Image (cartoon, helix red, strand yellow):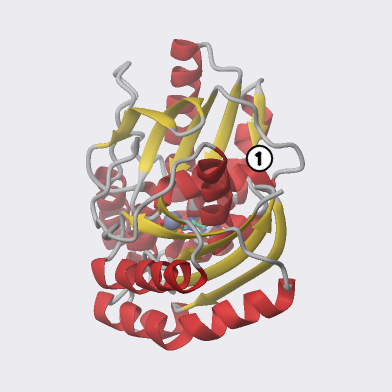
Amino acid sequence: MSVILGIETSCDETGVAVIRDGRIVLANEVASQIDVHKEFGGVVPEIASRQHTKIISQLVEKALRDCSAEIDAIAATRGPGLMGSLLVGLCFGKALAYAWAKPFIGVHHIEGHIYSSMFCERAPDFPFLALVVSGGHTQLVQCPAPHRYEIIGTTRDDAVGESFDKVARLLGLPYPGGPSIQKAAEGGDPGAYRFPRAMLDTERLEFRYSGLKTAVLYALREEKAPNIANLAASFQAAAVDVLLIKTKQAIQMLGAERVVLAGGVAANRLLRQRLTAELGIDVFLPPFAYCVDNGAMIAAAADSRFRHGLLDPLSATPDPSLTLG
Ligand code: KG4
Ligand code: ZN
């Protein structure tokens, strides 16, 4: 049995969780900073780190109170992310590890997202293909065994979540853009605009989302009374279409038998529906609570690292551009 405390502060969510045996959540505290950053239309790094500093000890105290379990190891996100934000969680985690004389584990943020699949009703077996879709990443990752990753496809420009955020801003919808666009799209016609699907003329597993955003901008400029629902629905349809097509290509190339969805955009209902309906293989969708940044996913990845003896020294430093694998 292992009990891990996981801390996530890479961007604008302070997440603290305690989990047992890699997938039983004993406590999960998430403090979102959305309201603080909303008026700026995106995350302000300096404000983000200050907010983490303000709230982290309260969240850790609450998580420990909620679970009252003996902690075996402490984990925190080491990167990628905002330097100031990463520093808060990593230093807090290392300080606890030192004070309690427990092992410390630094986790890659995307490894955490991939391990959010451990909270599915049935955890995926290795090997699997991961579709990672967040505010900073759009990647197809081959996962042959625990903690081994091969990035087989990535974006050439914007990440898909970033594209949702930028398009929402164009359409006058609130930050964060993903949930706003999903909501606005509910009453819209996804066929109203035929927005471009980039990179479909190539076998390469690459994404481009910048052109889609520009296409929405041009369509918006041409309308005297733009129909936001139709624009949102047509954008969402195009963004999701490309993810589906490239994932299908990757499955064929690798002969993959299961797909794990990971990252904040994994909360998108259209994406979840289409992956389940169209892939024809096992699809693992993390529960909604574990899609956007949280401490439980960091603890889940750390639990596996702990069991594999992959510990980190207290000299570990944050790395805003840490690579996976
Ligand atoms: O993983 P995450 O919480 O932070 C990063 O690691 O970036 O992902 C945040 C991203 C944002 O771009 C947000 O707009 C997007 O996930 N997102 C969504 C939805 N919920 C969050 N995108 C599409 N549909 C959603 N329902
Ligand atoms: Zn994330």
Left or right, residue 4 beside residue 23: left
Mark 1 Cα-neighbour bin, 10 Å: few <14, some 14–19, many ≥20: few
Residue furthest front as drawn: 101
- Measuring from the top left, give residue 98's x and y in whole percent: 42, 69
Residue furthest right as drawn: 121
Q: Viewer-proximal residue, 189 or 59? A: 59
- The amino acid type, in three-letter code, at marker 1 is Gln
Kindly identify the residue that appears in the image at 27 percent across and 48 percent down.
322
- Measuring from the top left, give residue 73's x and y in whole percent: 54, 58
- How many callouts does the rendering have? 1
Q: Is mark 1 within 8 Å of ligand 1?
A: no
Left or right, residue 35 beside residue 83: right
| Residue 227 seen in render | no
Q: Viewer-proximal residue, 70 or 147? A: 70
Kindly identify the residue that appears in the image at 38 percent across and 51 percent down.
312
- Measuring from the top left, give residue 33's x and y in whole percent: 45, 79
Q: Which of the 4 image quarters holds residue 164?
A: bottom left
Q: Viewer-proximal residue, 132 or 310? A: 310
Kindly identify the residue that appears in the image at 35 percent across and 59 percent down.
167
Q: Which of the 4 image quarters holds residue 196?
A: top left
**Image vertical order of residue 236 relative to residue 51, above or below:** above
User: Dot 1: what SS?
Assistant: helix
**Image vertical order of residue 255 relative to residue 11, above or below:** above
- Measuring from the top left, give residue 81's x and y in whole percent: 31, 60
| Residue 81 seen in render | yes
In the rendered image, which quarter contains the C terminus? top left
**Residue bearing the label numbered 1:** 273
Q: Viewer-proximal residue, 32 or 224? A: 32
Q: Which of the 4 image quarters holds residue 48?
A: bottom left
Left or right, residue 237 beside residue 319: right
